């Protein structure tokens, strides 16, 4: 085979790799053979049986354009079929049976909850501890000049956690990484960082991050899709939350290090640092207790305990800072109760309710399950 | 076994599906032969890409309308396109009944059209 057809066949082979793994395993070799034969015949003008066929660059170009024209629709159809099969296993049984990769077979079922071993529990707790500690340490004057590297380094750690979790089919430890990743991107999209230089780009005054805040998660999603070539992990993320609503609470809990740091937004450095460090330890302890917990109620209590302990520490920090201060043109000094502790108590109720929201999902599942069983 | 009404629930077939089943009616064909045969049958109006062809073959396999036949031997070592043994596809009994039902449906349409047109001319 000459250079042109060989190059086209190589490019075609690359396109085939973007099909779902089960489809690729079943048909890619055949499709490649068919394409190679078609392109060869178009190049030589002679069919395998010696019969003349249309020849030339025009014929080859038409062949390639036809493939390119139909490729997105064919790809979409097969991925949609793959996703449907992952949500309703067995739908494509038969020809695909026994051809799923080990990865897909391992991802096929969401694991039943058993208390996590220490290694897995620490992995889950690290999603709270690492960003919490980094945000706290950035409040120290000695480290603050490196705040962009610290903040984005912590975010990179979270993104790596999301990627690792995605590739492994979103095991339970990965939920707070997803939670923090989403909350951070959501928060950052409305934040402006005037003068910040990142990869040669300088942010101007009052310019919010907007869509740029989602680039990190977008890159992780593309990388994960290329690595897994399957939507099965995403399906597993949602089925995991559907079958065990506490995982969704755990994902929301993952955003708390950022929430606590934002509470100290107006507080001068280095006052927040020690409080944020202790609060991060409390959150991580809550995550550890969640991962090691046995029952739904026990795991939820672990999260609420982590939230409450970290909130108390932060309340003490905020009350100590604000009490007696004169702010703006007010001639009355602030009061620790009405200006710090009471708003924090209200905020605790709101955050606790947010953590409890997934309970509604659990109740909904309980309501619909008997109907399905019938 | 599918009843007649079950067969009719699958009709009408898409043009691609009908042409693929029609290609397989005489006997087993491998993918490339199906692709060329579909183009020939439709007077080059329907030119299947590999993605469309194998997506359709996959669904026909799942529906049990076709099945894999004995693999054809690979082309001779001296052939222009060497390769692996080529997988061929063949109609199942169910597939043949679906095809017959579709042909009967189309025939009934053509008969009705002929009748109406001849009445108009008369």
Image: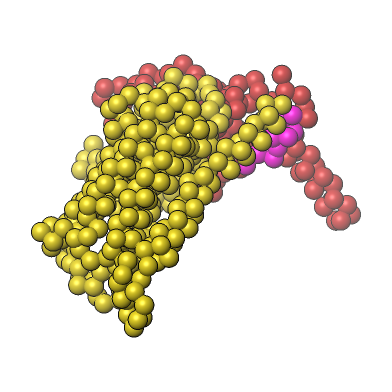
Of residues B91 and A77, which is closer to you in this image?
Answer: A77
Q: Is residue A174 left or right of residue A367?
A: left
Residue under the image location 36 percent in, 81 percent down: A330
Which hue belongs to chain A? yellow
Q: In the current view of this chain or complex, which residue is farthest to the left?
A: A142
Displayed quadrant of residue A345: bottom left
Of residues A120 and A301, which is closer to you in this image?
Answer: A301
Does residue A133 show up? yes
Residue under the image location 42 percent in, 28 percent down: A293
Q: Which residues are magenta?
A: B6-14
Q: Is residue A6 left or right of residue B109?
A: left
Residue under the image location 26 percent in, 52 percent down: A275
Of residues B104 and A50, which is closer to you in this image?
Answer: B104
- Spot occupied by residue A261 in the image (x, y as percentages of width and height): 30, 57
Q: In the current view of this chain or complex, which residue is farthest to the top?
A: B70
- Spot occupied by residue A100 in the image (x, y as percentages of width and height): 41, 25
């Amino acid at each position: 085979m000459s250079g042109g057809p060989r190059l086209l066949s190589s490019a075609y082979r690359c396109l085939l790799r973007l099909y779902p793994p089960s489809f690729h395993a079943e048909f890619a070799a055949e499709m490649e053979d068919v394409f190679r034969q078609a392109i060869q015949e178009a190049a030589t003008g002679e069919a395998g049986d010696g019969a003349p066929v249309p020849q030339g660059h025009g014929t080859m170009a038409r062949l390639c354009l036809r493939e390119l024209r139909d490729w997105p629709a064919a790809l979409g159809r097969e991925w949609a079929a793959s996703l449907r099969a992952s949500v309703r296993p067995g739908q494509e049984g038969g020809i695909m049976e026994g051809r799923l990769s080990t990865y897909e077979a391992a991802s096929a079922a969401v694991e039943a909850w058993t208390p996590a071993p220490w290694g897995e529990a620490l992995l889950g707790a690290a999603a709270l501890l690492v960003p919490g500690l980094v945000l706290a340490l950035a409040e120290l004057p000695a480290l603050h000049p490196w705040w962009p590297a610290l903040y984005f380094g912590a975010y990179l750690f979270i993104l790596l956690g999301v990627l690792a979790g995605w590739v492994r089919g979103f095991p339970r430890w990965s939920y707070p990484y997803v939670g923090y990743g989403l909350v951070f991107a959501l928060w950052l999209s409305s934040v402006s960082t005037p003068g910040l230089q990142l990869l040669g780009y300088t942010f101007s005054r009052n310019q919010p991050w907007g869509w740029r805040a989602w680039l990190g998660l977008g890159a992780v999603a593309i990388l994960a899709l290329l690595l897994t070539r399957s939507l099965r992990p995403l399906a597993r993320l949602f089925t995991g939350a559907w079958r065990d609503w506490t995982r969704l609470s755990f994902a929301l809990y993952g955003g708390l290090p950022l929430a606590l740091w934002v509470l100290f937004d107006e507080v001068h450095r280095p006052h927040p640092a020690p409080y944020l460090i202790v609060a991060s330890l409390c959150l991580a302890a809550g995550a550890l207790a969640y991962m090691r917990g046995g029952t739904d109620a026990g795991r939820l209590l672990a999260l609420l305990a982590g939230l409450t302990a970290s909130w108390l520490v932060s309340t003490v920090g905020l009350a100590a800072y604000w009490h007696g201060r004169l702010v703006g043109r007010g001639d009355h000094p602030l009061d620790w109760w009405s200006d710090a502790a009471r708003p924090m108590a209200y905020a605790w109720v709101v955050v606790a309710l947010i953590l409890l929201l997934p309970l509604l999902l659990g109740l909904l599942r309980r309501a619909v399950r008997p109907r399905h069983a019938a | 076994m599918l009843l007649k009404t079950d067969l009719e629930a699958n009709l009408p077939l898409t043009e691609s599906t009908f042409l693929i089943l029609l290609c397989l009616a005489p006997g087993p064909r491998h993918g490339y032969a199906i692709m060329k045969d579909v183009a020939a049958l439709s007077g080059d109006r329907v030119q299947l890409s590999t993605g469309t062809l194998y997506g359709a073959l996959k669904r026909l396999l799942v529906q049990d309308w076709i099945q894999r036949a004995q693999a054809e031997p690979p082309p001779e070592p001296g052939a222009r396109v060497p390769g692996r043994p080529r997988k061929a596809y063949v109609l199942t009994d169910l597939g043949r009944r679906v095809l017959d039902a579709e042909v009967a449906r189309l025939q009934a349409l053509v008969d009705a059209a002929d009748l109406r047109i001849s009445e108009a001319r008369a």
